[in-house]
Image (cartoon, helix red, strand yellow):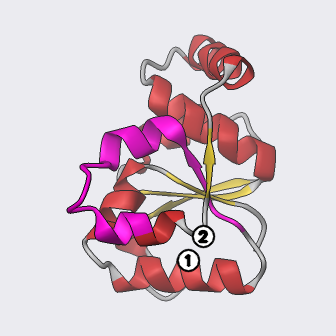
Amino acid sequence: MAGLTLDTGALIAAERNDRPLWALLDQAMSDGVVPQIPAAVLAQAWRGAPSARIGQLLQNCDVVALDEDLGKKSGELLGRTKGHDAVDASVVVTAARVGGKIVTSDPGDLVQLAASIVGLEILAVRELEKPRK
């Protein structure tokens, strides 16, 4: 598996102990892939002490800071695609850096943002348990 980037829906699924998501994360880590989580995504999902499973997940992930470069590239992506969600754009730009897959609960906006980026696959949390062809 190439890179793996998680959006807010993936973190919420982890907190809900979604078994197919945890299986995907276990496989990624077994393959030596360190999942990426943009810091803005963590801010959307983190609620403190009740987020025990997200805390567990963070032990094996890289949290990507929203620095000047990521901020500019996310804004440029929004401009090119006429998008509006800076957090979604930061997910796509983070994923573009590592390639591979984005895991989300709401693929609609991400599909549009990622359309011009070769090599990204958008996986919906609800589709993880379905057999792949």
* Frontmost residue, 2 versus 49: 49
**Relative to 95, 2 lies left or right:** right
Q: Nearer the viewer, mark 2 or mark 1?
A: 2
Residue beneath label 1, please? Answer: 25
Q: Which residues are magenta?
A: 34-55
Is residue 45 within the magenta segment? yes
Neighbour tally class for label 1: few under 14, some 14-19, many 20 plus, Cα within 10 Å = many
Residue beneath label 2, please? Answer: 60
Residue 71 position (above or below residue 43): above
- Residue in view at x 62 percent, y 22 percent: 74
Neighbour tally class for label 2: few under 14, some 14-19, many 20 plus, Cα within 10 Å = some
Q: Earlier in the sequence, mark 2 or mark 1?
A: 1
Q: Residue type at mark 2?
A: Asn
Mark 1 and mark 2 in contact (Cβ < 8 Å)? yes
Q: Secondary structure at mark 2?
A: loop
Q: Is residue 129 visible?
A: no
Q: Of the numbered discs in the image, which one, if any, rests on residue 33?
A: none
- Quick one: quadrant of the N terminus? bottom right
Q: Position of residue 56 (x, y in %)?
A: 44, 72
- Residue in view at x 78 percent, y 77 percent: 32
Q: Residue type at mark 1?
A: Leu
* Frontmost residue, 72 versus 48: 48
